[in-house]
Image: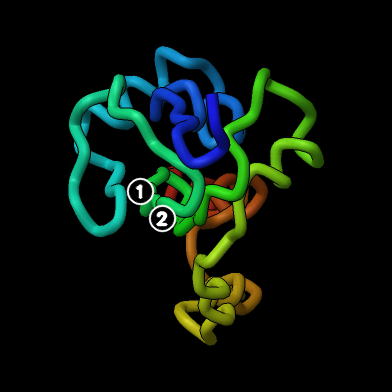
């Protein structure tokens, strides 16, 4: 096959590029409507993609925008899989100064629930002789 005519199944490429852990999860990702090809929503895992297509993938950890650079022949390590695409995703937003955990509550001595020793002393005062 000549270079421009080469195509690969979408679910298989997502698995090769390590966007999904298994091919079945890649199919569910596509069939669930979480993948767009060149801004068009794709719900068919067997859709054929080609070099130059731009995929927008909604993953649980965020949205990724990937440009297909190579179709790949098999699933490889993450560093080799990164050569299959160019990541066009915007950088993650900086960590905001959002809600912080509240400081630990501090009680004054003697405030709150009495200790066992204090309760016994109170019982001695109240107890009729």
Q: Is residue 42 left or right of residue 116?
A: left
Residue ID at (41%, 13%): 24
Label 2: state its secondary structure: strand
Reply above or below: 105 against 51.
below
Q: Nearer the viewer, residue 11 or 108?
A: 11
Q: Nearer the viewer, residue 123 or 111?
A: 111
Q: For residue 54, which numbered disc appears in the image?
A: 2
Q: Mark 2, residues whose alpha carbon is within 10 Å: few (<14), some, or many (≥20)? A: many
Residue ID at (60%, 35%): 17
What colour scheme governs how the chains and residues are painted in the rendered image of this protein?
A: rainbow
- Residue 45 visible within the image: yes
Residue extending farthest bottom: 97
Q: Which residue is mark 1?
A: 58
Residue extending farthest front: 2
Reply above or below: 25 against 20.
above
Q: Nearer the viewer, residue 70 or 17?
A: 70
Query: How far from the left and from the top, in percent, is residue 124?
Result: 55, 48
Q: Is residue 17 left or right of residue 9?
A: right
Query: How far from the left and from the top, in percent, is residue 87?
Result: 58, 60
Residue ID at (72%, 46%): 83
Q: Mark 1, residues whose alpha carbon is within 10 Å: few (<14), some, or many (≥20)? A: some
- Residue 107 visible within the image: no
Q: Nearer the viewer, residue 65 or 99?
A: 65
Mark 2 or 1: the one toward you = 2
Separation (CA) of disc 2 from disc 1? 13 Å
Q: How many marks?
A: 2
Label 1: state its secondary structure: strand
Q: For residue 72, which numbered disc appears in the image?
A: none
Query: How far from the left and from the top, in percent, is residue 66?
Result: 50, 54
Residue ID at (27%, 42%): 34
């Amino acid at each position: 096959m000549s270079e421009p005519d080469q195509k690969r199944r979408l679910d298989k490429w997502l698995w090769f590029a390590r966007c999904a852990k298994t091919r079945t999860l890649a199919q569910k990702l596509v069939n669930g409507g979480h993948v767009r090809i060149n801004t068009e929503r794709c719900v068919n895992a067997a859709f054929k993609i080609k070099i130059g297509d731009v995929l927008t993938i909604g993953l649980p950890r965020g949205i990724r925008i990937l440009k297909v650079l190579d179709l790949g022949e098999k699933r490889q390590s993450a560093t080799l899989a990164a050569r299959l695409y160019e990541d066009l995703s915007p950088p993650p937003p900086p960590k905001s100064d959002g809600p912080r955990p509240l400081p630990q509550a501090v009680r004054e001595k003697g405030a709150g629930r009495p200790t066992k020793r204090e309760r016994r002393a109170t019982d001695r005062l109240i107890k009729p002789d």
